[in-house]
Amino acid sequence: MNKIINIYTDGSSKGNPGPGGYSVFIEKFFGYSYYRNIIYEGFRCTTNNRMELLAVITGLKNIRTKKNTIIVFTDSKYIINAVNNKWIYEWEKNNFYKKKNIDLWKLFLKFFTTKLVFFHWIKSHNNHYINEFCDKLSTMTYKNNQLKIDYNYEKLMNKK
């Protein structure tokens, strides 16, 4: 029996670049049982798009099985358009020439292409309780004093 897994994601940053964070809410329905997992992290210097993308990657990475249907709910048009309009495959063919966040897009493809994943855009700040929860959590993460380093982004920024 194919099981449904919903992944709700959000990413944010204060400034672009600036401190940022992401959150992921995973819910699995297995017959009559229900499972949820909440993941979040904050970074000292990053961008909103990187956090949105890292949230989706983290969600997909945490689904071990390849047989389930996964629905990713995100308010990121950046991700929705790249996937649903199949831009990501053109970018990959062109080795991501002149694209931002290449490291994350490559990592995204590693997990996305091995699973049955559908994307659903959800309007942000529209009173959807899980989306609002993810929004608050992603914002809270970068207000923490123990922020991680987004090494790939900071290395790129130091080259400029």
Image: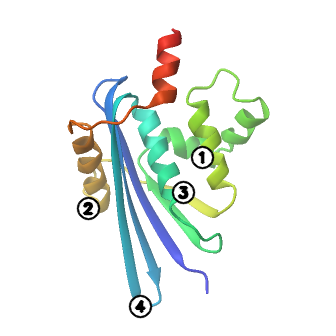
Up-down relation of residue 127 to residue 108 (above or below): below
Camera-nearest residue between 119 and 139: 139
Sort mark 4 into few (<14), some (14-19) or many (20+) by Cα contacts within 10 Å: few
Measure the C-alpha gap from mark 1 to mark 4: 31 Å
Q: Which residue is mark 4?
A: 32
Q: Which residue is mark 1?
A: 108
Q: Residue at x 39, y 33 (%)?
A: 48
Measure the C-alpha gap from mark 3 to mark 1: 9 Å
Q: Secondary structure at mark 3?
A: helix
Measure the C-alpha gap from mark 2 to mark 4: 22 Å
Of marks 4 and 3, the one in the foreground: 3
Camera-nearest residue between 156 and 6: 156
Q: Which residue is mark 2?
A: 129
Q: Secondary structure at mark 4?
A: loop
Camera-nearest residue between 89 and 59: 59
Of callouts 2 and 3, which one flags the residue occurring earlier in the amino acid sequence? 3
Camera-nearest residue between 76 and 66: 66
Of callouts 1 and 4, which one flags the residue occurring earlier in the amino acid sequence? 4
The residue at the far top in this view is: 160
Kind of residue sitting beneath label 1: Phe
Q: Is residue 48 left or right of residue 107?
A: left
Q: Secondary structure at mark 2?
A: helix
Up-down relation of residue 28 to residue 83 (above or below): below
Measure the C-alpha gap from mark 2 to mark 3: 24 Å
Of callouts 3 and 1, which one flags the residue occurring earlier in the amino acid sequence? 3
Kind of residue sitting beneath label 4: Tyr
Measure the C-alpha gap from mark 1 to mark 2: 26 Å
Q: Residue at x 77, y 29 (%)?
A: 94
